[in-house]
Image: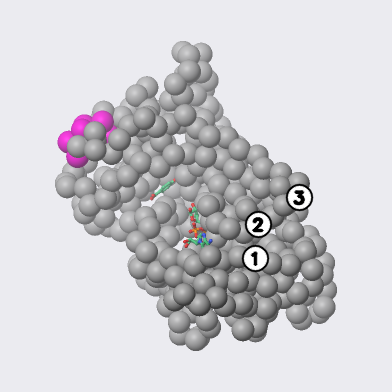
Amino acid sequence: MRTQVAIVGAGPAGLLLGRLLHTRGIDSVILEQRSPDYVLGRIRAGVLEHGACALLRKAGVGARMDAEGLVHAGVALCFDGTARRIDFDDLVGREVMVYGQTEVTRDLMDARAATGAPAIYEAQDVALHDFDRDHPRVTYRKDGITHEIACDFIAGCDGFHGVSRASVPPAAIQTFERVYPFGWLGVLVDRPPVSPELIYVSHERGFALCSMRSTTRSRYYVQCSLEDEVGAWSDDRFWDELRHRLDPASAATLQTGPSIEKSIAPLRSFVAEPMRFGRLFLAGDAAHIVPPTGAKGLNLAVSDVAYLAEALGGFYADHSSDGIDSYSVRALHRVWKAERFSWWMTTMLHRFPDSSQFDRRLQRAEFDLLMDSRAAAQAMAETYTGPVM
Ligand code: APR
Ligand code: PHB
């Protein structure tokens, strides 16, 4: 088989790249190691920046998002029981869309199926070859048979544990990493959210977050220890802990119920540089990870592939390599801003095991600055809602 761009991974990065290339008349084949049901079964965050929404609409995959997504014009920050709102509309005139990553993925899968563009699921042993030359190849095994795809470019959209980044010679890549000494225990519940907007909570006992998937399904998190086991957290224990960390008004109105999913996720910041190696490009979680506190993971995947589609579009339309030559620098510029923001939100709101009363006072001062200074709140709102792409 031959294609112009071989895409490894059918997460949001790979599927959206395929879609953006299709709208430019560029062929792609997507290779995914899992089944579609497995991919759609993963529970991930779902806050879309203003620019990401615009891009999905432009790519023709925004209709269900606009019909079912929830537009949020602000978030609440709550510090030791006092909640205050950051008003995005007033501060920056932009909003975000709460629409689950799973739904974005489903819309992209459906759109691809409708165009008939190939997506090969349950592709085993995907291997990348010759991306340091002009004619790269990707091989994979399916139903016991080995297949080869000849291509012009490979897009590594296969997440943090994928094969693409691991295929780069170690001397050609530099990585930067911070692993945080705590996790998030998440619970999904079929109850209306405690508040129509997200609440990010900093409490002496640790961070908490009130989020949602719809007006009837909520997603809640509490910071936990990395040594904690999900089994040690009964639903009752979870709700008690969440109530404890919330402001009194929210704690009193929180609607609890049996969890329909409960899991612990670690928090990590990670960046690989560069994001291009000859004819291989990395995009999304394959190149970088942010802790979920700033809700930037999905948005970075979207901006990476927007840049990459533009770069490849320039290559095929004008025989120009300017876009592909600048992809890595352009993407990393945006990535590091999101890394800073996610690290800052994480540091401001979490309890660190070795933190002192001095550190807690600094966190309080950071919160007070956001509440007292329009400029500080504006900077937060601008970054949370994202740049105009
Ligand atoms: N071969 C083929 N596919 C692979 C391989 C492999 N060796 N390794 C991983 N994959 C697939 C995974 O099964 C997954 O479906 O690549 C896909 C990567 O998808 P994601 O992990 O969702 O990553 P990405 O598309 O970059 O999306 C980033 O996901 O983790 C969140 O916060 C993050 O929201 C962000 C988004
Ligand atoms: C979520 O809804 O899962 C979510 C929302 C915002 C975040 C992180 C996770 O910052």
| Mark 3 residue element | helix
Q: Which residue is mark 3?
A: 172
Answer yes or no: do the residues labelled 1 and 2 have beta carbons within 8 Å?
Answer: yes
In this picture, which residue range is highlighted in magenta?
Answer: 235-242
> At x 22% / y 52%, what residue is drawn?
260
In magenta stretch: residue 240: yes
Answer yes or no: do the residues labelled 2 and 3 have beta carbons within 8 Å?
Answer: no
Bin the neighbour count of mark 2 within 10 Å (Cα to Cα): few under 14, some 14-19, many 20 and up: some
Q: Is residue 330 above or below residue 65?
A: above
Q: Between residues 192 and 159, which one lies in front from this camera angle?
A: 159
- Between discs 1 and 3, the one toward the N terminus: 1
Q: Is residue 317 above or below residue 266?
A: below
Tell me the kind of residue under disc 2: Ser
| Mark 1 residue element | strand
Which residue of the protein is positioned furthest toward the top in this rendering? 357
Position of residue 261 measured from the top left corner of the image (x, y, whole percent): 26, 50
Q: How far apart are labels 1 and 2 at the CA level?
A: 7 Å
> Magenta part mainly helix, strand or loop?
helix
Q: Is residue 358 visible?
A: yes
Q: How is the image coloured?
A: one colour
Side of 27 where 195 appears, left or right:
left
Position of residue 174 measured from the top left corner of the image (x, y, whole percent): 71, 44
Bin the neighbour count of mark 1 within 10 Å (Cα to Cα): few under 14, some 14-19, many 20 and up: many
| Mark 2 residue element | loop
Tell me the kind of residue under disc 3: Ala
* Mark 1 or mark 3, whichever is nearer to me: 1
> At x 44% / y 21%, what residue is drawn?
353
Q: Which residue is mark 2?
A: 167
Q: Which residue is mark 1?
A: 128
Q: How far apart are labels 1 and 3 at the CA level?
A: 16 Å
